[in-house]
Image (cartoon, rainbow, N blue to C red):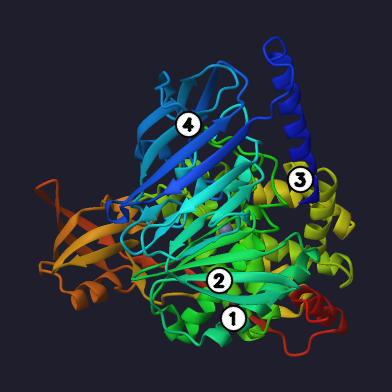
Amino acid sequence: MLNNSKSLVRHLALAGLLTSSFGAAATPAAVVPTLRYTLAMPAPQTHYFEVKMDFGGFPAEYTDVKIPVWAPGSYLVREYAKNVEGFQARTTGGQALAVEKLNKNTWRVRHPKQTNFQVSYKVYAYELSVRTSFIDADHGYLNGTSVFMYPAENKSLGSTVVVEPAAGWTQVSTALKPSPGKFTYKAASYDELADSPIEIGTHKVLEFTANGTPHQVAMYGTYTVDEPKLMADLKKVCEEAHRVVGQNPLDRYLFIVHHLERGGGGLEHLNSTTLEVGRTTYSTEAGYKSFLDLAAHEYFHLWNVKRIRPVALGPFNYDQENYTNMLWVSEGMTSYYARMINLRAGILSQEEFLGKLGNTITQVENTPGNRVQSAAASSFDAWIRAYRPNENTSNTEISYYSKGDLIGTVLDLSIAEATKGQKHLDDVFRLLYDTYYKKANRGFTDKEFQDAVATVAGRRYDDFFQNSVYGTKTLDYATVLGYAGLALNVAPLNPNGTLGASFANRGGRFFVTNVERDLAAWNGGLNVNDEVLLINGSAPTEESAKQLLGSPVGTELKLQVRRDGLTRDLTLKATADPDRKYTVQPVASPTAAQQKVLAKWLGTNK
Ligand SMILES: [Zn+2]
């Protein structure tokens, strides 16, 4: 935070100097540009936000005004300009200024040097997800990137933001710093504005303090929960998260929680996060814990990715994809720490923690794409793959979330073993925070991450990174779990045979939804979207389909399918199901060295 503000002061000073040199002939005194946003929503039921941008003292003869094409944390070009309409520019006297659209997300406004002028536009906002914007008669929610534009040459300029809520709306929740005036805020730069979502409406705001820092929880929608218990558990989770890196960059923090019919997912921001959950999430123990896991994940991002980050992820280029090989660190290890933090906070038992680890190994190892795509490639191609799944995704891709989670597990245990229980992955994050965020105020390269692991462990992992992170070599779970006195058990997931295909029953009609690489359906030519008309001469029912498709190994099945309006017959022979179930259990009599590694790994020796 300190480094960020220093660099902003430098940027502002630079902006001032440029102003004085460009404008020297006409204006003797340097004019520092100013920017003020007004966000209005007079007719929320029509799903429009109305934005005014008041520019003061801009030095050139024109100003290019842009809207991002993507939102940091969600690696897909979403083309937010498509929802903009009515872009206009006027002098303060009301005289229209010439506007030229240069490309999909840039408008050039021509204006006399250093005059004040106003840009106004509307944004259609009817996509309620954590990474987009939405407004209806009940509430408004926005991500800065999809609503606020910025002057292309002055992205580091600070601004004032005034929110004018719809009639009857009394609450505005945002991590932006309050400024004098009702619902008025300061953004230190466009990056901060873009990274500070805003919730507007009549929502309830809960509060707690964690590690001496005030936390607010803006709860939109209906839900049933024991609020004091939820806040107490969230506080425990936040305080455990603080212990990982051991440094608190926050003045305050905001959770925005959307309770919807269906929900799932969150998006991290600099000093806040948005979580989307089902209205009944808290009604079961599993749902309640899944909420705390999601909260821990997004909260841990305030260190991992918002501050400890790969070089490509900040400062951002809002015009295009920002490529990195390391989302397995930024996302995968964040998922890893979410589970670890919930264990250390006492929300998860050790048995539950190991159960979830076994499930993640099961999920990764049973995904054929794990043998095709590396964690690094999965990260790099997030922009074209992760957010655009198709019927072949599981055959060709591995999630950088789950694979990175397991790489974190392997590295953490390996570091604890290499240092005889003195260090663990937390120390790598501490080193990265100090070296690259606090001292250098930049992201780290792939090599610098590997160097940090080597420094903490006292040994290099070059072969490991090359083979199992940038390559697809299977992670050696059994060896590293053994360091902590844990055994990996492997058993067939399904004792029957399989065709390697999945089906969906749509109103009594059976359609192929997935064909798994290298199994009978794949090799025998069954296609996704084929409708199965007959299995061994009979029309399938839910029960018969299940039975027949799980026939013993070697059984021949005659399928008649309809494809593109024509029927065809296929004969497929069931093979053994290669899927395995992995479980992790403590050995009966761990050695003292194993117990030490286990205690360091789980953080129970603090
Ligand atoms: Zn994440």
Quarter of the image holding residue 415?
bottom right
Q: Look at 72% across and 13% down and name the residue there.
A: 24
Gap in Å between the C-alphas at discs 3 and 4? 27 Å
Count of residue discs: 4
Q: Give the image quadrant in which the ligand numbered 1 is located.
A: bottom right
Q: Earlier in the sequence, mark 3 or mark 1?
A: 3
Residues at marks 1 and 2, CA–CA distance in whole angstroms: 9 Å
**Does label 2 or label 4 sit earlier along the sequence?**
4
Q: Estimate the x, y position of residue 572 in percent, counting from the top left.
A: 26, 59
* Label of residue 217 in the image: 2
Question: Mark 1 vs ligand 1: CB under 8 Å?
Answer: no
* Disc 2 crowd, CA 10 A, few/some/many (<14, 14-19, 20+): many
Do tag 1 and tag 2 residues touch (Cβ < 8 Å)?
A: yes
Determine the image quadrant of residue 214: bottom right
Report how far apart the C-alphas of labels 2 and 4 lie in the structure: 34 Å
Q: Mark 1 is on which residue type?
A: Met
Mark 3, residue position = 5
Q: Position of residue 425 (x, y in %)?
A: 77, 63
